[in-house]
Image: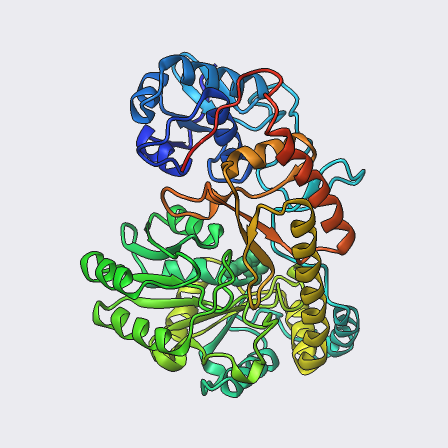
Amino acid sequence: MVYVIVATVTAARLRELLGLSASDTPGYRALADAVRLLVAEGGLAPRTRLPSERELTGALAVSRTTVTRAYAELRDAGYLVSRRGSGSVVSLPGSGLTTRVSPVPEALGVHLDDSPDGSVLAWTIASSRAVPGVGRASALAVQALPAYLAQSGYHLAGVPALREALARRYTERGLPTDPDQVVVTAGAQAAWTLLMRSLARPGDRVLLDSPTYPNAADGVRLGGLRPLGVPLDGGRWDLEALGSTVASARPALAYLLPDFHNPTGALMDDETRSRLGALLGRSGTTAVVDETMVDLSLDVEEGTMPLPFGAHDRTAVLVGSASKSFWGGLRIGWVRAPHDVARLLLQRRSGTDLGASLLDQLVVSELLADRDAVLVEQRDTLRAGRAHLLDLLATHLPDWEPSRPAGGMALWTRLPGRGSTQVVAAAERGGLLLTSGPRFFVGPGGEQHLRLPYSRTPEHLDEAVRRLTRAWHALDRPAPTSRAISLTA
Ligand SMILES: Cc1ncc(COP(=O)(O)O)c(C=O)c1O
Protein backbone atom coordinates (compact mmCIF):
# COMPACT_ATOMS: atom_id res chain seq x y z
CA MET A 1 0.00 0.00 0.00
CA VAL A 2 1.23 3.53 -0.83
CA TYR A 3 0.23 6.26 1.61
CA VAL A 4 -0.92 9.79 0.86
CA ILE A 5 1.98 11.97 1.98
CA VAL A 6 1.08 15.46 3.21
CA ALA A 7 4.63 16.72 3.81
CA THR A 8 8.23 15.64 3.64
CA VAL A 9 10.74 16.60 6.27
CA THR A 10 14.42 16.71 5.39
CA ALA A 11 17.08 15.28 7.68
CA ALA A 12 18.40 18.76 8.51
CA ARG A 13 14.91 19.99 9.33
CA LEU A 14 14.18 16.97 11.49
CA ARG A 15 17.37 17.61 13.42
CA GLU A 16 16.21 21.18 13.96
CA LEU A 17 12.70 20.11 15.00
CA LEU A 18 14.21 17.69 17.49
CA GLY A 19 16.16 20.55 19.00
CA LEU A 20 19.49 18.87 18.34
CA SER A 21 22.59 20.97 17.86
CA ALA A 22 25.48 19.91 15.62
CA SER A 23 27.32 18.30 18.54
CA ASP A 24 24.40 16.19 19.80
CA THR A 25 24.69 12.47 19.07
CA PRO A 26 21.62 10.77 20.49
CA GLY A 27 21.39 7.05 21.11
CA TYR A 28 18.61 5.09 19.43
CA ARG A 29 16.27 5.14 22.41
CA ALA A 30 16.69 8.87 22.91
CA LEU A 31 16.17 9.46 19.19
CA ALA A 32 13.02 7.34 19.12
CA ASP A 33 11.66 9.10 22.22
CA ALA A 34 12.38 12.50 20.75
CA VAL A 35 10.59 11.73 17.46
CA ARG A 36 7.66 10.17 19.30
CA LEU A 37 7.26 13.27 21.45
CA LEU A 38 7.47 15.51 18.46
CA VAL A 39 4.57 13.61 16.91
CA ALA A 40 2.58 13.50 20.15
CA GLU A 41 3.08 17.25 20.69
CA GLY A 42 1.92 18.09 17.20
CA GLY A 43 5.31 19.16 15.85
CA LEU A 44 5.24 16.49 13.15
CA ALA A 45 1.95 15.78 11.42
CA PRO A 46 0.75 12.28 10.60
CA ARG A 47 1.49 11.30 6.97
CA THR A 48 4.72 13.27 6.97
CA ARG A 49 7.54 11.40 5.25
CA LEU A 50 10.68 11.18 7.39
CA PRO A 51 14.15 11.20 5.86
CA SER A 52 15.60 7.85 4.85
CA GLU A 53 17.76 6.05 7.39
CA ARG A 54 20.83 6.85 5.32
CA GLU A 55 20.05 10.59 5.16
CA LEU A 56 19.31 10.83 8.87
CA THR A 57 22.45 8.90 9.75
CA GLY A 58 24.47 11.52 7.88
CA ALA A 59 22.64 14.52 9.31
CA LEU A 60 22.90 13.37 12.93
CA ALA A 61 26.42 11.97 12.64
CA VAL A 62 25.31 8.79 14.41
CA SER A 63 25.71 5.19 13.34
CA ARG A 64 23.31 3.62 10.87
CA THR A 65 22.34 1.10 13.56
CA THR A 66 21.17 3.95 15.81
CA VAL A 67 18.74 5.23 13.20
CA THR A 68 17.63 1.74 12.13
CA ARG A 69 16.86 0.78 15.72
CA ALA A 70 15.12 4.10 16.44
CA TYR A 71 12.89 3.70 13.39
CA ALA A 72 12.19 0.08 14.34
CA GLU A 73 11.15 1.17 17.84
CA LEU A 74 8.89 3.87 16.39
CA ARG A 75 7.31 1.32 14.06
CA ASP A 76 6.72 -1.05 16.98
CA ALA A 77 5.03 1.72 18.94
CA GLY A 78 2.84 2.63 15.97
CA TYR A 79 4.39 6.03 15.27
CA LEU A 80 5.88 5.09 11.91
CA VAL A 81 4.92 2.97 8.97
CA SER A 82 7.44 2.00 6.33
CA ARG A 83 6.44 0.79 2.88
CA ARG A 84 8.26 0.47 -0.37
CA GLY A 85 7.37 3.53 -2.44
CA SER A 86 6.33 5.61 0.57
CA GLY A 87 9.45 5.52 2.73
CA SER A 88 8.97 5.97 6.48
CA VAL A 89 5.78 7.86 7.20
CA VAL A 90 4.62 9.36 10.51
CA SER A 91 1.53 7.77 11.97
CA LEU A 92 -0.51 7.93 15.16
CA PRO A 93 -0.96 4.70 17.08
CA GLY A 94 -4.32 3.11 16.37
CA SER A 95 -5.11 5.66 13.65
CA GLY A 96 -5.67 3.21 10.83
CA LEU A 97 -2.30 3.87 9.27
CA THR A 98 -1.18 1.25 11.76
CA THR A 99 -3.12 -1.34 13.69
CA ARG A 100 -0.94 -1.33 16.77
CA VAL A 101 -2.21 -0.04 20.07
CA SER A 102 -0.56 2.98 21.63
CA PRO A 103 1.29 2.60 24.91
CA VAL A 104 -0.27 5.97 25.82
CA PRO A 105 -4.05 6.18 25.75
CA GLU A 106 -5.49 8.98 23.64
CA ALA A 107 -2.25 9.64 21.79
CA LEU A 108 -4.06 12.04 19.49
CA GLY A 109 -1.32 14.56 18.92
CA VAL A 110 -2.31 17.10 21.55
CA HIS A 111 -2.97 16.04 25.11
CA LEU A 112 -5.19 18.56 26.85
CA ASP A 113 -7.10 16.70 29.51
CA ASP A 114 -6.58 13.94 32.05
CA SER A 115 -7.94 10.51 31.19
CA PRO A 116 -11.28 9.93 32.98
CA ASP A 117 -9.83 7.18 35.20
CA GLY A 118 -6.87 9.34 36.24
CA SER A 119 -4.30 6.92 34.86
CA VAL A 120 -2.99 9.60 32.50
CA LEU A 121 -2.48 13.12 33.80
CA ALA A 122 -2.10 15.88 31.22
CA TRP A 123 0.21 18.68 32.39
CA THR A 124 0.80 19.96 28.92
CA ILE A 125 -0.99 23.27 28.65
CA ALA A 126 -0.92 26.39 30.77
CA SER A 127 -4.60 26.94 31.44
CA SER A 128 -6.99 26.89 34.36
CA ARG A 129 -10.52 25.79 35.01
CA ALA A 130 -13.17 28.48 34.41
CA VAL A 131 -13.10 31.36 36.87
CA PRO A 132 -16.19 31.25 39.14
CA GLY A 133 -17.73 34.30 37.43
CA VAL A 134 -18.22 32.43 34.14
CA GLY A 135 -21.46 30.78 35.31
CA ARG A 136 -23.05 34.07 36.38
CA ALA A 137 -21.84 35.92 33.26
CA SER A 138 -23.31 33.17 31.08
CA ALA A 139 -26.71 33.53 32.77
CA LEU A 140 -26.63 37.31 32.19
CA ALA A 141 -25.59 36.77 28.57
CA VAL A 142 -28.56 34.49 27.99
CA GLN A 143 -30.80 37.23 29.39
CA ALA A 144 -29.27 39.74 26.94
CA LEU A 145 -29.55 37.38 23.97
CA PRO A 146 -33.19 38.11 22.91
CA ALA A 147 -32.15 41.61 21.79
CA TYR A 148 -29.99 39.97 19.11
CA LEU A 149 -32.20 37.14 17.94
CA ALA A 150 -34.02 39.12 15.26
CA GLN A 151 -30.70 39.87 13.52
CA SER A 152 -28.49 37.60 11.44
CA GLY A 153 -26.03 36.92 14.27
CA TYR A 154 -23.04 37.67 12.02
CA HIS A 155 -20.76 40.36 13.40
CA LEU A 156 -17.58 40.30 11.35
CA ALA A 157 -15.85 42.80 13.65
CA GLY A 158 -17.52 41.62 16.83
CA VAL A 159 -20.54 42.60 18.91
CA PRO A 160 -20.50 46.37 19.53
CA ALA A 161 -20.90 46.01 23.32
CA LEU A 162 -17.74 43.89 23.51
CA ARG A 163 -15.70 46.07 21.16
CA GLU A 164 -16.62 49.10 23.26
CA ALA A 165 -15.66 47.38 26.51
CA LEU A 166 -12.32 46.26 25.05
CA ALA A 167 -11.57 49.72 23.66
CA ARG A 168 -12.27 51.24 27.10
CA ARG A 169 -9.85 48.79 28.69
CA TYR A 170 -7.00 49.77 26.33
CA THR A 171 -7.71 53.42 27.00
CA GLU A 172 -7.57 52.79 30.79
CA ARG A 173 -4.20 51.07 30.28
CA GLY A 174 -2.77 54.16 28.59
CA LEU A 175 -3.48 53.38 24.94
CA PRO A 176 -6.40 55.49 23.70
CA THR A 177 -8.53 53.26 21.50
CA ASP A 178 -11.89 53.54 19.81
CA PRO A 179 -14.08 50.52 19.10
CA ASP A 180 -13.37 50.65 15.35
CA GLN A 181 -9.82 49.55 16.16
CA VAL A 182 -11.01 46.32 17.76
CA VAL A 183 -11.79 43.11 15.84
CA VAL A 184 -13.12 40.19 17.87
CA THR A 185 -11.89 36.72 16.91
CA ALA A 186 -12.36 33.12 18.04
CA GLY A 187 -9.34 33.30 20.36
CA ALA A 188 -5.83 34.74 20.23
CA GLN A 189 -4.51 31.94 18.04
CA ALA A 190 -7.21 32.67 15.45
CA ALA A 191 -6.29 36.36 15.66
CA TRP A 192 -2.65 35.49 14.93
CA THR A 193 -3.68 33.38 11.93
CA LEU A 194 -5.82 36.21 10.56
CA LEU A 195 -2.97 38.68 11.05
CA MET A 196 -0.42 36.51 9.27
CA ARG A 197 -2.80 36.00 6.35
CA SER A 198 -3.51 39.70 6.14
CA LEU A 199 -0.11 41.28 6.79
CA ALA A 200 2.40 38.82 5.30
CA ARG A 201 2.92 36.89 2.11
CA PRO A 202 4.11 33.28 1.79
CA GLY A 203 7.87 33.16 2.12
CA ASP A 204 8.06 36.24 4.36
CA ARG A 205 10.07 35.94 7.53
CA VAL A 206 8.53 36.19 10.98
CA LEU A 207 10.67 36.99 13.99
CA LEU A 208 9.89 35.11 17.21
CA ASP A 209 11.61 34.74 20.55
CA SER A 210 13.20 31.38 21.11
CA PRO A 211 11.68 29.99 23.30
CA THR A 212 8.17 31.13 22.41
CA TYR A 213 4.57 29.96 22.41
CA PRO A 214 4.81 26.89 20.17
CA ASN A 215 1.42 27.18 18.49
CA ALA A 216 2.39 30.63 17.24
CA ALA A 217 5.50 29.17 15.57
CA ASP A 218 3.45 26.29 14.14
CA GLY A 219 1.07 28.85 12.66
CA VAL A 220 3.96 30.60 10.96
CA ARG A 221 5.11 27.39 9.28
CA LEU A 222 1.58 26.32 8.34
CA GLY A 223 1.02 29.70 6.70
CA GLY A 224 4.05 29.20 4.47
CA LEU A 225 6.02 31.90 6.32
CA ARG A 226 9.54 31.43 7.64
CA PRO A 227 10.11 31.54 11.42
CA LEU A 228 13.25 33.25 12.61
CA GLY A 229 14.13 32.65 16.26
CA VAL A 230 16.11 35.09 18.39
CA PRO A 231 17.32 33.67 21.73
CA LEU A 232 15.59 34.94 24.85
CA ASP A 233 17.96 33.98 27.65
CA GLY A 234 17.50 34.48 31.36
CA GLY A 235 14.22 36.33 30.88
CA ARG A 236 15.84 39.28 29.09
CA TRP A 237 15.31 40.47 25.54
CA ASP A 238 18.64 40.99 23.81
CA LEU A 239 18.12 44.21 21.86
CA GLU A 240 21.47 43.88 20.15
CA ALA A 241 20.68 40.41 18.78
CA LEU A 242 17.16 41.49 17.87
CA GLY A 243 18.49 44.60 16.14
CA SER A 244 21.04 42.80 14.01
CA THR A 245 18.58 40.03 13.06
CA VAL A 246 15.90 42.53 12.10
CA ALA A 247 18.35 44.67 10.11
CA SER A 248 19.70 41.74 8.12
CA ALA A 249 16.55 39.61 7.65
CA ARG A 250 13.91 42.39 7.50
CA PRO A 251 11.08 40.20 8.77
CA ALA A 252 7.54 41.22 7.83
CA LEU A 253 6.26 40.52 11.33
CA ALA A 254 7.64 40.13 14.83
CA TYR A 255 5.57 38.00 17.21
CA LEU A 256 6.22 39.25 20.75
CA LEU A 257 5.09 38.22 24.23
CA PRO A 258 6.20 41.10 26.47
CA ASP A 259 3.60 40.53 29.19
CA PHE A 260 4.47 37.36 31.12
CA HIS A 261 6.10 35.66 28.22
CA ASN A 262 5.10 32.07 27.59
CA PRO A 263 7.02 29.95 28.64
CA THR A 264 9.58 32.03 30.61
CA GLY A 265 7.17 34.39 32.41
CA ALA A 266 9.41 37.38 31.58
CA LEU A 267 7.97 40.90 31.66
CA MET A 268 9.44 43.48 29.27
CA ASP A 269 10.08 46.91 30.79
CA ASP A 270 8.95 50.17 29.21
CA GLU A 271 12.38 51.18 28.00
CA THR A 272 12.89 47.88 26.16
CA ARG A 273 9.43 48.19 24.61
CA SER A 274 10.25 51.64 23.36
CA ARG A 275 13.66 50.69 21.94
CA LEU A 276 12.38 47.48 20.38
CA GLY A 277 9.47 49.32 18.78
CA ALA A 278 11.88 51.84 17.28
CA LEU A 279 14.22 49.23 15.84
CA LEU A 280 11.33 47.25 14.32
CA GLY A 281 10.05 50.47 12.80
CA ARG A 282 13.39 51.08 11.07
CA SER A 283 13.07 47.85 9.08
CA GLY A 284 9.35 48.14 8.40
CA THR A 285 8.58 45.14 10.63
CA THR A 286 5.12 45.11 12.20
CA ALA A 287 5.09 44.05 15.85
CA VAL A 288 2.28 41.64 16.69
CA VAL A 289 2.06 41.62 20.46
CA ASP A 290 0.29 38.70 22.09
CA GLU A 291 -1.08 39.94 25.42
CA THR A 292 -2.86 36.72 26.33
CA MET A 293 -1.28 36.63 29.82
CA VAL A 294 -1.40 40.38 30.56
CA ASP A 295 -4.15 40.15 33.20
CA LEU A 296 -2.29 37.51 35.18
CA SER A 297 0.03 39.81 37.05
CA LEU A 298 0.81 38.17 40.39
CA ASP A 299 3.50 40.42 41.86
CA VAL A 300 3.15 43.67 39.91
CA GLU A 301 0.29 46.02 40.84
CA GLU A 302 -1.92 46.48 37.80
CA GLY A 303 -1.43 50.26 37.96
CA THR A 304 2.34 49.90 37.76
CA MET A 305 2.45 47.49 34.80
CA PRO A 306 4.45 48.71 31.79
CA LEU A 307 2.40 50.51 29.15
CA PRO A 308 0.95 48.38 26.34
CA PHE A 309 3.52 47.91 23.56
CA GLY A 310 1.23 49.90 21.26
CA ALA A 311 1.73 53.00 23.42
CA HIS A 312 5.43 52.90 22.51
CA ASP A 313 5.01 51.77 18.92
CA ARG A 314 1.90 53.22 17.26
CA THR A 315 2.05 50.70 14.40
CA ALA A 316 2.03 47.67 16.69
CA VAL A 317 -0.92 45.29 16.54
CA LEU A 318 -2.05 43.87 19.88
CA VAL A 319 -3.73 40.51 20.37
CA GLY A 320 -5.83 39.69 23.44
CA SER A 321 -7.71 36.70 24.76
CA ALA A 322 -10.35 35.73 27.31
CA SER A 323 -8.80 32.27 27.63
CA LYS A 324 -6.40 32.83 30.51
CA SER A 325 -8.18 35.64 32.33
CA PHE A 326 -11.54 33.85 32.35
CA TRP A 327 -11.74 30.50 30.52
CA GLY A 328 -10.39 28.81 27.40
CA GLY A 329 -13.82 27.35 26.68
CA LEU A 330 -15.16 30.76 25.71
CA ARG A 331 -13.02 30.85 22.56
CA ILE A 332 -12.94 34.63 22.40
CA GLY A 333 -9.92 36.74 21.47
CA TRP A 334 -9.42 40.03 19.69
CA VAL A 335 -7.08 42.33 17.80
CA ARG A 336 -6.43 45.98 18.62
CA ALA A 337 -4.83 47.64 15.60
CA PRO A 338 -4.33 51.00 13.90
CA HIS A 339 -7.50 51.94 11.96
CA ASP A 340 -6.15 51.00 8.52
CA VAL A 341 -5.03 47.57 9.73
CA ALA A 342 -8.37 46.93 11.46
CA ARG A 343 -10.14 47.75 8.17
CA LEU A 344 -7.81 45.47 6.23
CA LEU A 345 -8.51 42.62 8.64
CA LEU A 346 -12.23 42.97 8.03
CA GLN A 347 -11.71 42.91 4.27
CA ARG A 348 -9.60 39.75 4.54
CA ARG A 349 -11.53 38.05 7.27
CA SER A 350 -14.32 36.37 5.32
CA GLY A 351 -11.76 34.08 3.67
CA THR A 352 -10.86 32.75 7.11
CA ASP A 353 -14.06 32.79 9.16
CA LEU A 354 -17.19 34.86 9.64
CA GLY A 355 -16.83 35.92 13.23
CA ALA A 356 -16.82 34.54 16.76
CA SER A 357 -19.76 33.06 18.64
CA LEU A 358 -22.21 35.81 19.58
CA LEU A 359 -23.26 34.25 22.87
CA ASP A 360 -19.65 33.83 23.97
CA GLN A 361 -19.00 37.47 23.12
CA LEU A 362 -21.88 38.46 25.38
CA VAL A 363 -20.46 36.30 28.17
CA VAL A 364 -17.08 38.04 27.85
CA SER A 365 -18.80 41.45 27.87
CA GLU A 366 -20.43 40.50 31.19
CA LEU A 367 -17.12 39.27 32.60
CA LEU A 368 -15.42 42.52 31.63
CA ALA A 369 -18.14 44.48 33.43
CA ASP A 370 -17.13 42.59 36.59
CA ARG A 371 -13.47 42.36 35.64
CA ASP A 372 -11.79 43.53 38.84
CA ALA A 373 -13.59 41.14 41.16
CA VAL A 374 -13.23 38.20 38.78
CA LEU A 375 -9.51 38.75 38.30
CA VAL A 376 -8.79 39.14 42.01
CA GLU A 377 -9.96 35.57 42.42
CA GLN A 378 -8.07 34.24 39.41
CA ARG A 379 -4.84 35.89 40.55
CA ASP A 380 -5.24 34.61 44.14
CA THR A 381 -5.70 31.09 42.80
CA LEU A 382 -2.63 31.39 40.58
CA ARG A 383 -0.51 32.86 43.37
CA ALA A 384 -1.45 29.91 45.59
CA GLY A 385 -0.70 27.50 42.73
CA ARG A 386 2.71 29.05 42.13
CA ALA A 387 3.62 28.85 45.85
CA HIS A 388 2.38 25.27 46.07
CA LEU A 389 4.31 24.10 43.01
CA LEU A 390 7.49 25.86 44.13
CA ASP A 391 7.16 24.11 47.53
CA LEU A 392 6.60 20.74 45.90
CA LEU A 393 9.67 21.14 43.70
CA ALA A 394 11.83 22.35 46.59
CA THR A 395 10.79 19.28 48.60
CA HIS A 396 10.87 16.56 45.95
CA LEU A 397 13.23 17.83 43.27
CA PRO A 398 15.54 20.17 45.16
CA ASP A 399 18.20 20.23 42.42
CA TRP A 400 15.81 21.71 39.89
CA GLU A 401 15.98 25.43 39.31
CA PRO A 402 12.49 26.81 38.68
CA SER A 403 11.88 30.43 37.76
CA ARG A 404 9.61 32.50 39.98
CA PRO A 405 7.71 34.49 37.36
CA ALA A 406 5.94 37.71 38.35
CA GLY A 407 2.89 36.59 36.40
CA GLY A 408 1.45 34.12 33.92
CA MET A 409 0.65 30.48 34.51
CA ALA A 410 3.84 28.42 34.49
CA LEU A 411 7.29 27.92 35.92
CA TRP A 412 10.14 27.60 33.46
CA THR A 413 12.41 25.11 35.14
CA ARG A 414 16.07 24.41 34.51
CA LEU A 415 16.94 20.73 34.80
CA PRO A 416 20.17 19.58 36.35
CA GLY A 417 21.92 17.13 34.08
CA ARG A 418 19.17 15.25 32.30
CA GLY A 419 17.70 16.28 28.96
CA SER A 420 14.10 17.49 28.86
CA THR A 421 13.07 14.97 26.21
CA GLN A 422 14.32 12.10 28.32
CA VAL A 423 12.42 13.34 31.35
CA VAL A 424 9.22 13.82 29.36
CA ALA A 425 9.51 10.34 27.85
CA ALA A 426 10.05 8.78 31.29
CA ALA A 427 7.12 10.73 32.75
CA GLU A 428 4.89 9.63 29.89
CA ARG A 429 5.71 6.00 30.68
CA GLY A 430 4.52 6.73 34.23
CA GLY A 431 1.22 8.31 33.15
CA LEU A 432 2.20 11.99 33.13
CA LEU A 433 2.13 14.00 29.92
CA LEU A 434 4.37 17.05 29.72
CA THR A 435 5.51 19.40 26.99
CA SER A 436 9.22 19.06 26.37
CA GLY A 437 11.56 22.08 26.38
CA PRO A 438 12.54 21.86 22.67
CA ARG A 439 8.88 22.26 21.67
CA PHE A 440 9.14 25.92 22.71
CA PHE A 441 12.25 26.64 20.67
CA VAL A 442 12.47 27.95 17.15
CA GLY A 443 15.48 25.92 16.03
CA PRO A 444 17.82 24.06 18.37
CA GLY A 445 17.62 24.31 22.14
CA GLY A 446 15.35 23.52 25.05
CA GLU A 447 16.83 20.31 26.40
CA GLN A 448 17.76 22.03 29.64
CA HIS A 449 14.26 23.20 30.44
CA LEU A 450 10.73 22.07 31.24
CA ARG A 451 7.62 24.21 31.51
CA LEU A 452 5.48 23.34 34.52
CA PRO A 453 2.08 25.07 34.70
CA TYR A 454 0.91 26.03 38.21
CA SER A 455 -2.57 26.84 36.96
CA ARG A 456 -3.97 23.44 37.89
CA THR A 457 -5.64 22.43 41.19
CA PRO A 458 -3.42 21.61 44.23
CA GLU A 459 -4.47 17.94 43.97
CA HIS A 460 -3.42 17.84 40.33
CA LEU A 461 -0.08 19.44 41.15
CA ASP A 462 0.53 16.98 44.03
CA GLU A 463 -0.07 13.98 41.81
CA ALA A 464 1.80 15.43 38.85
CA VAL A 465 4.91 16.14 40.93
CA ARG A 466 4.68 12.67 42.48
CA ARG A 467 4.76 11.09 39.01
CA LEU A 468 7.43 13.51 37.82
CA THR A 469 9.67 12.70 40.78
CA ARG A 470 9.26 9.00 40.16
CA ALA A 471 10.14 9.47 36.49
CA TRP A 472 13.16 11.59 37.36
CA HIS A 473 14.55 8.97 39.72
CA ALA A 474 13.77 6.18 37.25
CA LEU A 475 16.25 7.85 34.91
CA ASP A 476 19.01 6.97 37.35
CA ARG A 477 18.32 3.29 36.69
CA PRO A 478 19.09 1.60 33.37
CA ALA A 479 16.10 1.49 31.03
CA PRO A 480 14.51 -1.98 30.98
CA THR A 481 14.97 -2.70 27.29
CA SER A 482 18.08 -0.79 26.34
CA ARG A 483 21.05 1.12 27.55
CA ALA A 484 19.96 4.66 28.48
CA ILE A 485 21.69 7.26 26.40
CA SER A 486 21.17 10.93 26.98
CA LEU A 487 20.60 13.75 24.55
CA THR A 488 22.94 16.57 25.35
CA ALA A 489 22.27 20.18 24.51
C1 LIG B 1 0.79 33.16 24.61
C2 LIG B 1 -0.48 32.52 24.16
N1 LIG B 1 -1.08 32.98 23.07
C3 LIG B 1 -2.23 32.42 22.63
C4 LIG B 1 -2.79 31.36 23.29
C5 LIG B 1 -4.06 30.79 22.75
O1 LIG B 1 -5.10 31.63 23.10
P1 LIG B 1 -6.60 31.36 22.66
O2 LIG B 1 -7.13 30.29 23.54
O3 LIG B 1 -7.26 32.69 22.91
O4 LIG B 1 -6.59 31.00 21.21
C6 LIG B 1 -2.19 30.85 24.44
C7 LIG B 1 -2.76 29.70 25.13
O5 LIG B 1 -2.07 28.94 25.75
C8 LIG B 1 -1.00 31.46 24.88
O6 LIG B 1 -0.38 31.01 25.97
Q: Quadrant of residue 278?
A: bottom left
Q: Is residue 96 above or below residue 453?
A: above
The x, y position of residue 205, in whole percent, is 28, 54
Residue located at (55% from left, 86% from top): 168
Q: Is residue 30 above or below residue 245?
A: above
Q: Going by the image, does 36 lie left or right of 12?
A: right
Q: Quadrant of residue 22?
A: top left
Looking at the figure, which quarter contains the C terminus? Answer: top left
Instruction: Judge whether residue 207 can be spotted in this image.
Output: yes
Q: Is residue 438 above or below residue 11?
A: below
Residue located at (59% from left, 21% from top): 478
Near-viewer residue (39 or 257): 257
Residue located at (69% from left, 55% from top): 391
Q: Quadrant of residue 285?
A: bottom left
The x, y position of residue 336, in whole percent, is 46, 75
The x, y position of residue 114, in whole percent, is 72, 43
Q: How many marks?
A: 0
Instruction: Judge whether residue 107 can be spotted in this image.
Output: no
Ligand 1 image position (quadrant): bottom right
